[in-house]
Amino acid sequence: MAENKTPHAELRYIAPDVELGEEVTIRQFTNLYGCRIGDETRVGTFVEIQRGATIGKRCKIGSHSFICEGVHIGDGCFIGHNVSFINDRFPAAVGPDGELLGDGEWEMVETHVEDGAAIGTGAIIMCGVRIGKRATIGAGAVVTKNVKPGTIVAGVPARLIRRKEN
């Protein structure tokens, strides 16, 4: 495992199967499980990144964000504070028989955030969407559909605001 810049290392959890790139910064009160994080990425406080998630190089992950299994974030992305990714299209606590569902008894749906995208504070990203290269998601938006590259979306549900100029 590469050396990383981790202030207050005793106040966070990094599972043994986490892959960290070079010069990764992980702030305190963060939990990482079986994920891969690229070089020079900064992860804020109170963040959880689950098993199977991937984060590219030179990203910034804001505090209190939740990146679940099946989320793949490209290089140079910005994830604001308190952003939540959802990976289950039909969440449930119990099955049709009334029994409590266990791990793996649900359908995980992947989400992709392409290089250079930015997601504003408090946004919710529903499962199965692709956020295009250099797209911007406004603060508090709920993204339920794919977002085209180079566009700005905002609102609940997120709608096209405008296309970015090159």
Image (cartoon, grey):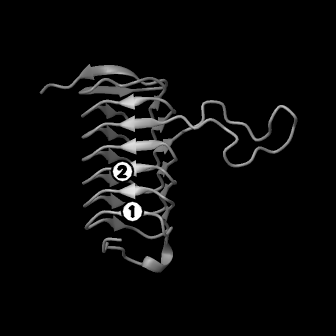
Residue 132: quarter of image: top left
Q: On residue 125, which mark appears?
A: none
- In the image, residue 114 lies at what x, y percent? 30, 37
Distance from disc 2 to disc 1, alpha carbons, whole Å, reads 10 Å
Instruction: Name which residue lies at 80% across and 39% down.
Output: 94
Relative horizontal placement of residue 132, taking residue 92 as reference (left or right)? left
Q: Which residue is mark 2?
A: 55
Whether residue 24 is visible here, answered yes or no, is: yes
Residue 4: quarter of image: bottom left
Q: Relative to 161, does residue 30 appear above or below in the rendering?
A: below
Q: Residues within 10 Å of mark 1 (few under 14, many from 20)?
A: some
Badge 2 or badge 1: first in the primary sequence: 1
Foreground tag (2 vs 1): 1
Q: Relative to 159, does residue 86 appear above or below in the rendering?
A: below
Which kind of residue does numbered mark 1 sit on?
Glu
Q: Which residue is mark 1?
A: 19
Instruction: Name which residue lies at 66% across and 30% down.
Output: 90
Instruction: Name which residue lies at 60% across and 36% down.
Output: 88
- In the image, residue 154 lies at what x, y percent? 38, 27
- In the image, residue 100 lies at what x, y percent? 81, 45
Q: Relative to 162, does residue 9 appear above or below in the rendering?
A: below
Q: Residues within 10 Å of mark 2 (few under 14, many from 20)?
A: many
Query: For the C terminus, which image quadrant?
Result: top left
Which kind of residue does numbered mark 2 sit on?
Ile
The reply to whether dot 2 and dot 1 touch (C-beta < 8 Å) is: no
- In the image, residue 112 lies at what x, y percent? 39, 36
Q: Relative to 110, does residue 12 appear above or below in the rendering?
A: below
Whether residue 121 is visible here, answered yes or no, is: no
Q: Nearer the viewer, residue 157 or 111?
A: 111
Q: Nearer the viewer, residue 108 or 149?
A: 108
Q: Secondary structure at mark 1?
A: strand
